[in-house]
Image (tube, rainbow, N blue to C red):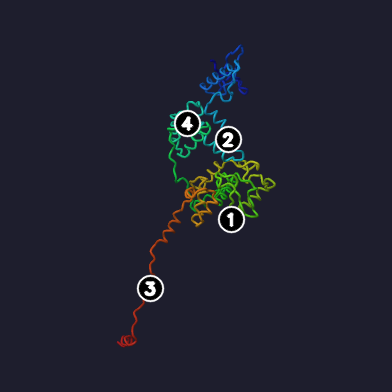
Amino acid sequence: MAVYKPTYRDKKTGEVKDSRIWWYDFSFAGRRIQESTHTHLLTLAREAERNRRREMEQAFVGAPMQKRETRVNSVAGILKSYLAAYELDHRGRQQSILFAKGRLAHVKRLLGAALLPDLTEDAIRGYITTRIEEKASGRTINMEVGELSRAIGKHWSVLWPKVRKQEERKDVGQALSPAEETRLLDAASKKKRWAHAAVIIRALLLTGMRSGELTGAMWGQIDLERRVFTVGRAKTSSGTGRQIPMNNDLYLLLKAHAEWFTQRFGETRPEYYVFPFGKPQPTDPTRPTTTLKTVWGSIRDEAGVSCRLHDLRHTAATKMAEAGTPESTMLALMGHMSRAMLERYSHIRMAAKREAVESLGFKKEPQKAETAPKVSPKVAKISRTQ
């Protein structure tokens, strides 16, 4: 076997450098085979050469050849193929694609160089241990390993039956207090470059929508005349297509945004995204904005509020619950499928709890004001003459 790193001359400096990528060079049936292994890892390079030799031997005897793209089953290669297929199958669902890529980013970082047979239960436990040391939550770790199992094409319980899932917190999420909400909105309106994000933040608080539902919305889903916002494809079947009536604040917000959009892009076509792609300013209405991670972090720091973007949805649910909104109505507006999930989102705040328990106090009879004792006219006359 002969794997090596070829040298090349840098066009800018003229310096001779070694390539980062390994190549293999061998002779077969009187031919010289000299090709790139497409990897900077020596172990994978040697595996690539072995598989290429095997492929040549099968072709020489007329046997069917293994596909070139699957000859080295590294985790990085598997993830690349999986994400490419995922993006193709989830066209128009940018948020889902970003979630899948985000879940697999740490998997690729820590396990990308491993070969598929190396993904033993001990290897997965090692990955989980590392992620725990990096302060990742149990839910995050479960999603990452679960996404890896889907990329491989088999269920977690089949691949690693003795590896238990991490405990997930049930109390994740919070509702902002009125003061925190005010500080957040004030901070979002401070800088012009945050104007786009400020509209999204206000709309999330006024609708209770998931961020992906809002950022993936098109103008065809917004009826300003009827004051109705129709949600597109959602996380749940009950959430897809649900209609959210606009209160006056939401109506004025979206109306002003539509006027800005028309000035910027000429018109609000039904197929245009309400919140277009572009950084720092929107530039392409045919693509949705992808992520608010950076700007959201800046606004949150400016406001001095510690919360997630998803907590705006918790806040909306809590405000409706405190206002006495019927459970069935909240389920319809939030797009939940169960009462248990709804309870997870509504957090009755201390002020509302305090007001509620005040009604449990014992009712006391009002005390009558003390009056001076009555004195008969005869007694009064005697006292005056004394």
The three-letter code of the residue at mark 1 reads Asn
What distance separates the C-alpha of mark 2 from that of mark 1? 37 Å
Q: Which image quarter holds the C terminus?
A: bottom left
Tell me the mark number nearer the camera, choosing from 4 and 1.
4
What distance separates the C-alpha of mark 4 from that of mark 2? 21 Å
Residue 159, disc:
4
Q: Secondary structure at mark 2?
A: helix
Q: Which residue is mark 1?
A: 247
Q: Residue at x 43, y 29 (%)?
A: 122
What distance separates the C-alpha of mark 4 from that of mark 3? 79 Å
Q: Which residue is mark 2?
A: 86
Earlier sequence position, callout 1 versus callout 3: 1
The three-letter code of the residue at mark 2 reads Tyr
Earlier sequence position, callout 4 versus callout 2: 2
Earlier sequence position, callout 4 versus callout 3: 4
Q: Residue at x 53, y 26 (%)?
A: 73
What distance separates the C-alpha of mark 4 from that of mark 1? 50 Å
Q: Nearer the viewer, residue 97 or 235?
A: 235
Residue 368, disc:
3
Q: Nearer the viewer, residue 157 or 182?
A: 157
Tell whether label 1 touches label 4 (CB within 8 Å): no
Q: Secondary structure at mark 1?
A: loop
Q: Position of residue 286 (x, y in %)?
A: 65, 41
